[in-house]
Image (spheres, rainbow, N blue to C red):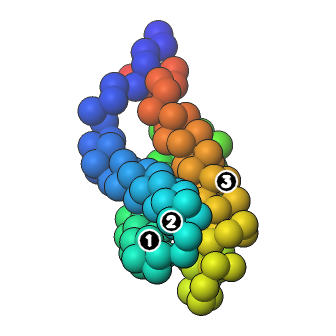
Amino acid sequence: MARPIANARHPILSMLLPIPIVCFVGALLTDLAYANSGGNFLWINFSSWLITAGLVFGGIAILILLVDGIRGSVSWLPFLLVAAAWVVEFLNALIHARDGWTAVVPTGLILSVIGVILILAGAWLSRSPRVVEDVR
């Protein structure tokens, strides 16, 4: 008999994955604010800190998704999407380390958009129910 996996089965991932999502979306919003502010460096600092926090908690979420993928309790696609978002945002952090307008516009802004799309897709797929065989 098949049954869907309950959402409460992985509470750690449910607590950790929203942190990089919020941080990466926040970094995108602060990148947009920087592009529209005429070069106010405050927004670059906000973006850099948000990306760093997202990378730290995203790395932990990737490890949890890797363990779940090895156990077979979640498909590999969410892991690959979140890992790809982490790589894109790591490159974005390196771009944001540069000085001036080119730290965000256009490369940093493009990487922020790609990273947000990837992390949202990975998070959405990690929460979708999966049917597994009930072994007794």
Residue of label 2: 37
Query: Does any portion of residue 16 appear in the rendered image?
Result: yes
Q: Position of residue 33 (x, y in %)?
A: 49, 60
12 up-or-down from 1: above or below: below
Q: Which disc is residue 114 wearing?
A: 3
Would you say the residues marked 1 and 2 are in contact, meaning their CB atoms lie under 8 Å apart?
yes
User: Residue 85 versus residue 79: which sits nearer the camera?
Assistant: 85
Whole-angstrom CA distance, mark 3 to mark 1, is: 19 Å
Residue at image position (62%, 45%) is 117
The type of residue carrying mark 2 is: Ser
Whole-angstrom CA distance, mark 2 to mark 3, is: 22 Å
Residue at image position (45%, 33%) is 127
For the C terminus, the image quarter is top left
Give the quadrant of residue 7.
top left
Q: Which disc is residue 43 wearing?
A: 1
Give the quadrant of residue 53.
bottom left
Query: Does any portion of residue 79 appear in the rendered image?
Result: no
Label 2 crowd bin: few (<14), some (14–19), many (20+), radius 10 Å: few
Q: Position of residue 6 (x, y in %)?
A: 34, 25
The type of residue carrying mark 1 is: Trp
Q: In front: mark 1 or mark 2?
A: 2
Q: Position of residue 78 (x, y in %)?
A: 58, 44
